[in-house]
Amino acid sequence: MTDTSSGDVAADVLATARRARVASTFLATASRATKDAALQAIAAALADRCDDVLIANKLDVDAAATSGATESYLDRLRLTAARVEAIAADVVKTAGLADPVGEIVRGGVLANGLELRQVRVPLGVVGIIYEGRPNVTVDAAALCLKSGNAVLLRGSSSALSSNEALVAIVRDAVASVGLPADVVQLVPGAGHEAAKHLMRARGLVDVLIPRGGANLIRSVVEESTVPVIETGVGNCHIYVDADADLAMALAIVVNAKTSRPSTCNTAETMLVHADIADAFLPLAISALQQAGVTIHGDARVAAVDPSVVAATDADWDTEYLSLDIAAAVVPSLDAAIAHIRAHGTAHSEAIVTRSHDSARTFIAQIDAAAVLVNASTRFVDGGEFGFGAEIGISTQKLHARGPMGLAELTSTKYVVVGDGHVR
Amino acid sequence: MTDTSSGDVAADVLATARRARVASTFLATASRATKDAALQAIAAALADRCDDVLIANKLDVDAAATSGATESYLDRLRLTAARVEAIAADVVKTAGLADPVGEIVRGGVLANGLELRQVRVPLGVVGIIYEGRPNVTVDAAALCLKSGNAVLLRGSSSALSSNEALVAIVRDAVASVGLPADVVQLVPGAGHEAAKHLMRARGLVDVLIPRGGANLIRSVVEESTVPVIETGVGNCHIYVDADADLAMALAIVVNAKTSRPSTCNTAETMLVHADIADAFLPLAISALQQAGVTIHGDARVAAVDPSVVAATDADWDTEYLSLDIAAAVVPSLDAAIAHIRAHGTAHSEAIVTRSHDSARTFIAQIDAAAVLVNASTRFVDGGEFGFGAEIGISTQKLHARGPMGLAELTSTKYVVVGDGHVR
């Protein structure tokens, strides 16, 4: 790439970000009624112009197929009339959620009579860098719009035609209710170059949320001067304590592993207390195998059944996202906690136990976005938590941790009202 | 610098960060009683070993004087018995504050019977990079300790002897109550090299808080892969609206400019509505001049009094931190808002008005950490807001915005308790 074209990409990205910034000031003070009208208009336009979307999507899918993409990749990329309908239904659902903007987080009257309140305000301009599924394009736009934020969308090049069609529809709908179309924009330019300029647009972009694999997230974290919220990587554990209810433990392990293996809240490692191993392991191995799961076990687990694959060191750190699970026997609760500290990604960690003390110790000692007692890790999700929507699951500690709903897409400002107060 | 010494610095900084990480796991689950005992022990040890501190501080002050530091710089660097006593008193005050750790931010029972609660937990390891005043060393250590965080302190080289003496006292006191001394450490190594390694210690350090001038903050933001909370730069405005109470406006302008000019919540620009300019400007200029303030005015302001210095474009963007103020006449509230948007740093912005509409518009349209109506910007402060303490004032939108107290030094985790729940 020549300097000139690099400079052009930079200028294009920055111009896009500046338009977003200007548009964001209008959106920040838009009423809930206006924002909800925009969302309803988006849903209606998606229904009206579904054919445009499907035609554009076919270009992407055909190109990906020609270049040899796997069927599972093509499936994530593919849109159908039913899928577009589901995307539109989610937008309508977002319209029904409460507006986070204006919520008073805390407030009162200070001793000197000053009235102080901390009020939710939009972040401003949110950048989303994502892979694969084009449904993220509309989901992210709807959540940002509802929370009063302009959004800059950077999808994968394989979904470019789909994303362009979807964003055109969204922008027309937004404009139809009198909001600036530029509250929703695709970041222009090809390849990593454009993403890089987005990551350096500090002052124009308030936060970047990468959604995708570990490599994408690492690259954004390392290159970005814009603040980043890390999402997603989940090497989640289920620890079956010495006095767990066996039937409960079995149900939770099978559910956490198999109900939707590609999600970040899926269990990837099962740890079993030595005292219960003889009773529990044969049941667990049998049930997991019946569900099609390959077990990567340590020596003690492998000894139970010849079908168990011997685990390597790498298994303890692997987020399979598939019907595979690592399994180990641990001598104590403390050993389980130490294992999770060494190998977990601080996403979601569960204990199955009847011991009050074990539950309390696990809750206190495990440092993760979510700690669960006698429940499947699969519940760690914005929808399940009652947030109504989710832009991702943060695995960092700053700003938001765990499932992020509309409130997590806001900042606050302090409003101080006096009567001529001086200090 | 050779590769070898650079490698040594990197290894030293990372080893320090790893010790902090280990120590932080003990501190995270320490009881409030233990943490408060540590704080009381620190205060007592500062009193007992005040002479050690003063001797070490004299080395720093003498070296700075020899190298030609200004008297105001030396004054910020200098400790006295009274100042050490004040530092100790602040530590005792911190001990008296409520423990943020364990606070339930929200919670309840979901429709499926799962109990869900979001609980405050420490961030983990906090890095503070700061300039000048050695009192920050103890302040930051006390606030991090109270909020359950290990702290890595990176002060300026000019205060190294003072900081070493203070940290030695703090560490002994912490160890005396059974906590690991490594919850408080100075980052080893000289110059920018060591700070750079601290900024790249992602995964070991959870957040970096730079405290100092704009250059320091910019450098940390640009070089750091560890999440950063920006603090401090405040180009704050007072807008005097068309129907302001003149006496009130006068009192607020003089207070906001002169009560402590070196602080970030000091007013740096006064904007006056054209309709009130003839009545207000002579009063304001006279009062400010009596208080020793130099006024950098636009043509309309300069026309009122020959002592007014003609403002240049740079004045509108200058955080003087001195007895200087920029002043301009604006034709409307909208023009005032546009000026603040163009030149403000989103710290603290005030309007003086008797108009309900003007106040509402200003509150809605100004995007800043704090927006004030009929009150001095000087109130934007953790102590004034009733937080009991302050680690800095965030001017960013992520995680914390405005004065940061103990709660802003925490993250949260979700605790989910079920009865065998599967999805």
Image (cartoon, coloured by chain):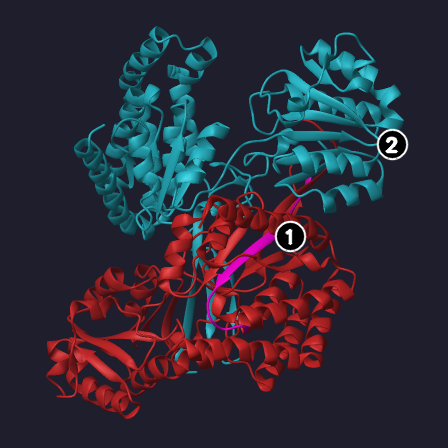
Chain colours: A cyan, B red
> What residue is rendered at 23% in x and 60% in y?
B342
Q: From what the image shows, is residue A53 above or below residue B285?
A: above
**Disc 2 residue type (three-letter):** Asp
Q: Residues within 10 Å of mark 1 (few under 14, many from 20)?
A: many
Q: Nearer the viewer, residue A107 or A154?
A: A154
Chain under callout 2: A
Residue B8: % across, % down = 55, 48
Q: CA distance from mark 2 to mark 1?
A: 35 Å
Mark 1 lies on a secondary structure that is helix
- Residue linked to disc 2: A243
Q: From what the image shows, is residue B67 above or below residue A380?
A: below
Q: From what the image shows, is residue B289 above or below residue B342?
A: below
> What residue is rendered at 66% in x and 22% in y?
A315
> What residue is rendered at 37% in x and 56% in y?
B218
Q: Is residue A128 left or right of residue A105?
A: left
Residue A235: % across, % down = 62, 29
Residue A64: % across, % down = 35, 12
- Residue linked to disc 1: B20
